Amino acid sequence: PEPRPAAGRRPALIPAYPAAERAVRALAEAVRYAAWRRTAAEPGRVPEYDDIQEAAAGADIERLLDRFTSDLAPGRSAALPPADAEALLARYGIHVRPALPAPDPDTAVRAAARLGYPVALKTTAPHLRHRADLGGVRLDIAGEAELRRTYTELTDFLGSPAELRPVVQAMAPRGVDTVVRAAIDPAAGAVLSFGLAGAPSQLLGDLAHRLIPATDREVGEQIRSIRGAPLLFGWRGSQPVDTGALEELLLRVSRLVDDHPEVVAVDLEPVVVAPRGLAVLGASVRLARPPATTDLGPRRLPFY
């Protein structure tokens, strides 16, 4: 006869699966959960940066909210003009590469002379933003004659300058194009997202997410967890990029959103990560009055 369990104890249950594949999948999930438990015990730290201007950023946010959200309905957010968004990000050591308006060829030439060649000519119309595949971004323009010719080709092909809203920007060092975002999720709270720019994130959804405030250990794991991560670390003989600078950028965005709940969305795209350093080429920020809440801090899974 089978032995009876001791009084007060439940009998041990042996899991059974209809196929070997399901058993292997369950075992893999158990291994992943055990690894997560080990790393969760040492989550890392939220670094301090001496150049962060938290109080000044808070004052800027209050001023901007008074200016841009006075007519907004409750729960709605406002997109900051590029200059205000870049100034706010700079308070947290996040510097966006300057882009000068170019409403006509002569202005574009003066902007390029100010920034220094080579330059890029880009459209900023919403339907063309970050769409290099449509010809809205022209790179490595080396001189005035080429810039004028490119400007004419761009406007003849895609539309008038008023529609395209072109800008001139100094060329960034070659590297891997990435995207860094932060947003408020109704279920999880503030979430930090990272992926490769373009098709990997837009078409394939290859993004990694972490709750804010993120620690140094978490962002290190985050950039390594996307499927396209090998491109950052020297895939097929390419030169590895500066992942240390990328991790610092993610931590600074996390700090900004954690310190100021009025910042409801940050979008940095593209962020070109080079072998040394990185360049933020585009940025947008949205602000809103935070709703009243009793839910303090990020949500964590309990341990049993």
Image (cartoon, rainbow, N blue to C red):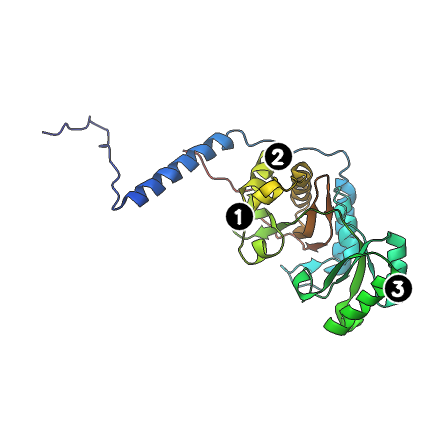
- The residue identified by callout 3 is 107
179 left or right, relative to 12: right
Q: Earlier in the sequence, mark 2 or mark 1?
A: 1
- For residue 153, say whether it is visible: yes
Pick the residue in front: 107 or 150.
150
Task: Pinpoint residue 197: horizontal percent, then vertical percent.
Answer: 63, 53
Q: Earlier in the sequence, mark 1 or mark 3?
A: 3
* The C terminus sits in image quarter: top left
Please state which of the two labelled residues, at mark 2 or mark 1, is closer to the viewer.
Answer: 2
Task: Pinpoint residue 150: horizontal percent, then vertical percent.
Answer: 80, 65
118 left or right, relative to 133: right
Task: Pinpoint residue 229: horizontal percent, then vertical percent.
Answer: 57, 43
User: Which class describes the residues within 10 Å of circle 3: few (<14), some (14-19), or many (20+)?
Assistant: some
User: Which class describes the residues within 10 Å of circle 2: few (<14), some (14-19), or many (20+)?
Assistant: some
Q: Secondary structure at mark 1?
A: loop
Numbered badge on residue 188: 1
- The residue identified by callout 2 is 216
Q: CA distance from mark 2 to mark 3?
A: 43 Å
Pick the residue in front: 157 or 41.
157
- For residue 131, say whether it is visible: no
Q: Secondary structure at mark 2?
A: helix
- Looking at the image, residue 29 lies above or below residue 197: above
269 left or right, relative to 152: left
Q: Earlier in the sequence, mark 2 or mark 3?
A: 3
